[in-house]
Image (cartoon, rainbow, N blue to C red):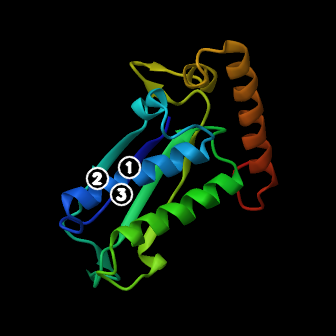
Amino acid sequence: MPMLDVHIPEGTFTADRETALMNRITEILIRHEGFDPTDPTTRSVSWVFLHRPAAVYVGGAPADAPRYKVVPSVPEGQLDAAARAGVVREVTEAILDAEEGAWPRDPGRVWVFPTEIPEGHWGGRGEITPLERILGRLTGGDADLAAELAAKRIAASRAERTRLPDGPR
C-alpha cells in the first residue's frame, strides 16, 4: 500500500514517458514491499502524487539539469534495510533511464527518501488503519496470515531501528 510523492521539474518528460516512469516506480515499491506488482488490488491502493516544481535551485542558483525527489511512504514494517536500499537504487535508475540521455547520467541529481509511517498513524477512509488490516486486504482476506505477517514485520522494523547507530530508539 505505497503512497509516493514524486517531484519532477515542470517540462522534464513527455506525458507518455512520465506515465511509464510513474508505473515503473510504483512497481518497484510494490515489489519491495513483498507483493505482486500486477495484482489489481495492490495496484488500487498504490497512489502517486506528482509534484511539479516550476524551478529547482542548487546552492541558490537555478539547477543546470533536472533534480528529482521521491518520497515513498509505507506502513511501518513494510521495508527492511535491504528493501529500502533497493528502492533507492532502483528508483534512481528508473528516473535516469527515463531521461534517455537528455542530461548527463548523474545519480546525485536524484534523492529518494523511503519513509515508514509508524503503526497507528496510517490514516485513510477517515480512520487509522493498522498494518494487520492492510495486509488482510492484500493477502486475500487471510486474517491469520495478515496478523502473523504484520506482527513479524513490525517487530523486525523496530528491532532494526534499535540496532542503527544514529537511528531512532
Circle 2 sits on which residue?
Answer: 19
Q: Residue at x 42, y 82 (%)?
A: 105
Q: Amino acid at mark 1?
A: Asn
Q: Is mark 3 in CB contact (under 8 Å) with mark 1?
A: yes
Q: Is mark 1 in CB contact (under 8 Å) with mark 2?
A: yes
Q: Amino acid at mark 2?
A: Thr
Q: Amino acid at mark 3?
A: Leu
Q: Distance between the Cα atoms at labels 2 and 3? A: 5 Å
Q: Distance between the Cα atoms at labels 1 and 2? A: 6 Å
Q: Residue at x 69, y 49 (%)?
A: 80
Q: Is mark 2 in CB contact (under 8 Å) with mark 3?
A: yes
Circle 1 sits on which residue?
Answer: 23
Location of residue 129 with respect to 15 vertically, above or below: above
Q: Residue at x 40, y 62 (%)?
A: 69
Circle 3 sits on which residue?
Answer: 21
**Which residue is most to the front?**
38
**Neighbourhood count class around disc 3 (C-alpha, 10 Å): few under 14, some 14–19, many 20 upward:** many
Q: Is 36 situated left or right of 106 in this image?
A: right
Q: Secondary structure at mark 2?
A: helix
- Seen from the viewer's position, the closer of residues 163 and 24 is 24
Q: Residue at x 42, y 53 (%)?
A: 24
Q: Secondary structure at mark 3?
A: helix
Q: Is 43 situated left or right of 120 in this image?
A: left
